Image (cartoon, rainbow, N blue to C red):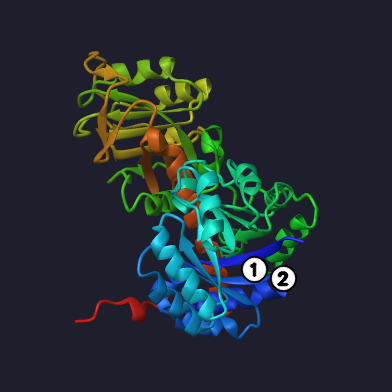
Amino acid sequence: MAILQVALDLINAHRALQIAKEAIEGGADWLEAGTPLIKAEGMNIVRQLKKFGKKVIADMKTIDVGAVEAEMAGKAGADVICILALASNETIKEVVKAAKRYGMEVMADMMGVKNKKERAKELEKIGIDYICLHTAIDEQMVGKNPFGEMEEVISSCHLPVAIAGGINAETALQAVERGASIVIVGGAIIKAENAKEATQKIKKAMEGVKIKSRLFKKYGKEEIYEALSKVSTCNICDAMHNKGAMRGIFPLKNGYHMIGKALTVKTIDGDWAKVVEAIDIADKKDVVVVQAGEGKQAVWGELATLSAFKKGIAGIVIDGAIRDVHEIKKYDIPIFTRKIVSEAGEPKGYGEIGCEIVCGGQIVRKGDWIVGDDNGVVVIPKEEAQEIANRAINVMERENRIREEIRRGSTLSKVLNLKRWEKKK
């Protein structure tokens, strides 16, 4: 039977310990003090996790000073130290020697190794106990998974193989069927509102029960729309490190979640010709995004709205002015604007469709993803859309867990342990 190892990749001990308790109740076999947790809390977190009576893995990701770090983990009570397979053979030999002195085992994380098959053979000769095939979280965001070289590595050595990287209740069975001896799960448990239930589902999956779930999955290039439909513009801005938000652009009415690819328009104040012409060019899933000058005269009104509504366009964003809002609000189409005025301009035909523009202070190109809701509008560069969509999902899932902890009686400052992380004068 494969082992379920729970990776506690958090930065606050009290949260890690609570989730560990829930995970054990759900059937977790091993507990991993994740790298962020060890960096934040030191080796004392290993001592605290040992109190649960489970095998504890210290994910040190050691790449140098092997004996020193192995000794640290061993003295804290770790049963397994996880190092980087990228480390030199000399460093790894020192880890193995020190680990034996403290009764520890050694797991080598193959993250970043090019020829995993040959490296696994080398590590087995050195004395490593476990091989870990790991797709890093940042790689997961662009669609990579840990299964690609799994069978090849398993066939090349006689060591138990652990697999890690975005595994959830739907993919845990796949990991076992492909030969994993240890299934390492992080996000699908630590981000779950109920870690006990999440762990139980993954254990059932590892035992052969096929579970269909869209939770904690990573979305491919063809699923960007689906992913963006699950998150808010706030989640997206967090995922983009507070970039992408259009300034001064607001929804005409609340309740919409606009998603689509940009069809850009550049025009001058009051010249609505190119804006209206864009409706004919736009596809149904496009958002028409307009740079329209100061906004002294409107470039959009009720008749343009009717045209866009009948065409089925995903939405309109005007960095300029619109009018006829009393009529526009009757139509079921998302519209975002900077200004509302009564006066319309003339259709002179200046400008361009499909060019690079600046809207709400953000550069927008044709094909960039546009998302709008009650909070405003964000633009996602098209070449980064898959990664940002997955990162936004990750933000949302982590917030769901925090929200649950607050509901249980905590507060935001306590959950995040804010005072500890404040800058000291």
Where residue 347 sits in the image (x, y, percent)? 26, 15
x 46%, y 50%: residue: 392
- The image quadrant of residue 202 is bottom right
Q: Which residue is mark 1?
A: 195
Residue at 65 percent across and 78 percent down: it is: 54
For the residue pair 133 and 386, the one nearer the viewer reads as 133
Q: How many marks?
A: 2
Badge 2 marks a residue whose secondary structure is loop
Q: CA distance from mark 2 to mark 1?
A: 8 Å
Q: Position of residue 114 (x, y in %)?
A: 45, 43
Residue count near mark 2 (Cα–Cα under 10 Å), binned few <14, some 14–19, many ≥20 = some
Residue 70 figure quarter: bottom left
Q: In the displayed structure, would residue 118 be above or below residue 80?
A: above
Q: Which amino acid, by three-letter code, is at mark 1?
A: Ala
Q: Tell me, yes or no, whether the two marked residues, 2 and 1, touch with CB atoms within 8 Å.
A: yes
Residue drawn at 68 percent across, 58 percent down = 181
Q: Quadrant of the N terminus?
A: bottom right
Residue type at tag 2: Gly
User: Is 308 rendered above or below residue 186?
Assistant: above
Question: Does residue 85 lie above or below 251 as drawn?
Answer: below
* Residue that carries the numbered disc 2 in the rendered image: 26
Residue 340: where, in percent of width, then height?
30, 38
Front: mark 2 or 1: 2
Please say whether residue 363 is visible from this viewpoint.
yes
* Helix, strand or loop status at disc 1: helix
In terms of sequence position, does the residue under pointer 2 or pointer 1 come before the other? 2
Q: Residue furthest front?
A: 125
Q: Residues within 10 Å of mark 1 (few under 14, many from 20)?
A: many
Q: Is residue 123 left or right of residue 318?
A: right
Residue 296, placed above or below residue 310: below
